[in-house]
Image (spheres, rainbow, N blue to C red):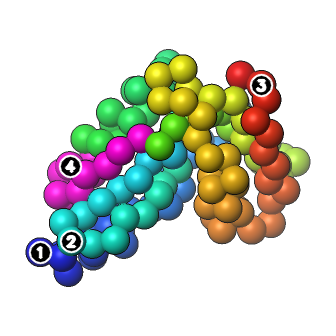
């Protein structure tokens, strides 16, 4: 089971965010049975609330036998024409995500971008 969970976990993308705009994001810790956990970033403009992002993510992961918990949220400003992403803000329901962790995940996914973060702002 641990090997299968590890394989399912390895197929979960570290980052899934919209290609442009300002939108909410959540930092989610994903776990498989007996497998090490990993943190993933999910951010989309369709989400009115951080909980919408988390619930959709949890449903998708559950189909693969994975569980998750929300570590917090914030906002992303993604400006592809400038190759910039700014991470900021917080989630009223989940609290502030560790933006430093989110920034590292985004840097791995967008190596040629300038990625910044700040704790202030909503």
Q: Is residue 66 above or below residue 33?
A: above
The tag earlier along the polypeptide, 4 or 1, is 1
Numbered tag placed on residue 1 in the rendering: 1
Tell me which residue sits at (87%, 48%) in the image. 82
Left or right of residue 82: residue 121: left
Residue under numbered circle 3: 121
Q: How far apart in space, not on screen, are marks 1 and 3 (Cα)?
A: 43 Å
Residue under numbered circle 4: 62
Question: Taking the image as drawn, is residue 17 in sight?
Answer: yes
Q: Quadrant of the N terminus?
A: bottom left
The mark lying in front, picked from 4 and 2, is 2
x and y percentages locating residue 32 in the rendered image: 24, 64
Callout 3 touching callout 4 (CB < 8 Å): no
Left or right of residue 112: residue 43: left
Nearest the eye: 50 or 72: 72
Q: How far apart in space, not on screen, are marks 1 and 2 (Cα)?
A: 7 Å
Residue 64 highlighted magenta (yes or no): yes
x and y percentages locating residue 49 in the rendered image: 48, 21
Q: How far apart in space, not on screen, are marks 4 and 1 (Cα)?
A: 15 Å
Callout 1 touching callout 3 (CB < 8 Å): no
Callout 1 touching callout 2 (CB < 8 Å): yes
For label 1, the SS is loop
The tag earlier along the polypeptide, 3 or 2, is 2
Numbered tag placed on residue 34 in the rendering: 2
Q: Is residue 30 above or below residue 82?
A: below
The tag earlier along the polypeptide, 3 or 4, is 4
The tag earlier along the polypeptide, 1 or 2, is 1
Q: Which residues are magenta?
A: 60-70
């Amino acid at each position: 089971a641990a090997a299968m969970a590890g394989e399912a976990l390895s197929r979960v993308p570290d980052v899934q965010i919209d290609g442009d705009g300002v939108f909410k994001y959540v930092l989610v810790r994903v776990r498989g049975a007996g497998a090490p956990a990993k943190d993933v970033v999910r951010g989309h403009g369709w989400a009115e609330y951080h909980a919408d992002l988390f619930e959709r993510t949890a449903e998708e992961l559950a189909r693969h036998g994975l569980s998750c918990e929300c570590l917090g949220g914030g906002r992303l400003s993604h400006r592809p024409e400038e190759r910039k992403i700014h991470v900021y803000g917080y989630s009223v329901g989940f609290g502030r995500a560790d933006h430093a962790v989110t920034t590292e995940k985004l840097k791995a996914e967008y190596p040629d971008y300038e990625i910044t973060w700040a704790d202030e702002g909503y």
